[in-house]
Image: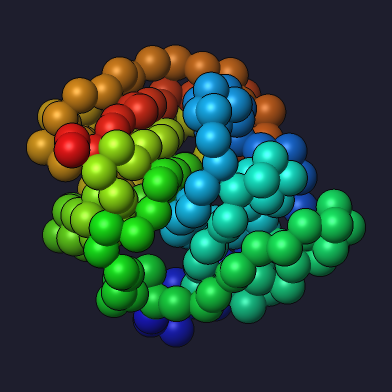
Amino acid sequence: MSDLKSNFWEERYSSEEYVYGVKPNQFFKQVLNKIPIPGKLLLPGEGEGRNAVYAAKMGWKVDAFDQSYNAKAKAEKLAMRNKVVINYSIVDLGTFTLTENHYNAASIIFVHFVPETRRTFHKKIIDSLKPGGKIILELFSKDQLGKSSGGPQDLEMLYSIDEIKNDFKVLNEENVFLDEGEKHKGEASVIRFVGEMVE
């Protein structure tokens, strides 16, 4: 990972406060609550662990990763406070490898890249799913540019519905109200998707 990216996220997660809160992403929670049997769950770009801890409390075996040591420390602290175990690794989000056909579900929540990296990243996540595995996706759309409710303020790193359709085939774009710590608060333009790997 580049030092610039690494330093940005180390700084972002350096405070005692959980900058995106300790409650799970609302869309992630809604979808996960509808999956009847917990299994193996992958959470890339997991940050401070709010989604990982929620899933582990539901009985999921969670593998999470990100590129910030500060984020990992806070995630593990949150897990300990909630008396759950998560497997959290530090990896380069641009060059990581995954076991194919391994997970029952994966969730990509507000993880943004330039187009070339985005396509590769999404393919790796899709390939890691078992047949019948679910994928849960929430990302900021290009209409998020200029809004103060979160996400990169770089048009190339925000996504259009057509770009993501190329990766995931079917999805929805909508305006929502985020209340996830100080960095995700207010009206936001997001792309949401729930998919299932074909047998």
Q: Residue furthest right?
A: 81
Quarter of the figure that contains the N terminus: bottom left
Of the pair 132 and 6, the residue shown nearer to us: 132
Q: Is residue 135 left or right of residue 126?
A: right
Q: Residue at x 30, y 19 (%)?
A: 172
Above-or-below relation of 197 to 93: above
Specify the color scheme: rainbow
Residue 115 in the image: x percent, y percent?
18, 53
User: Based on the displayed image, in which of its 4 quarters is residue 192 positioned?
Assistant: top left
User: Based on the displayed image, in which of its 4 quarters is residue 89 positioned?
Assistant: bottom right
Numbered label tally: 0
Residue 143 in the image: x percent, y percent?
34, 26
Q: Residue at x 63, y 77 (%)?
A: 69
Quarter of the figure that contains the C terminus: top left
Residue 87 in the image: x percent, y percent?
60, 68
Above-or-below relation of 86 to 19: below
Residue 37 in the image: x percent, y percent?
54, 35
Q: Is residue 101 left or right of residue 42?
A: left
Of the pair 173 and 60, the residue shown nearer to us: 60
Q: Residue at x 18, y 35 (%)?
A: 198
Q: Is residue 119 left or right of residue 176?
A: left
Above-or-below relation of 14 to 145: below
Q: Is residue 143 left or right of residue 82?
A: left
Of the pair 97 and 158, the residue shown nearer to us: 97
Q: Residue at x 29, y 50 (%)?
A: 130
Q: Is residue 15 visible?
A: no
Q: Is residue 133 visible?
A: yes
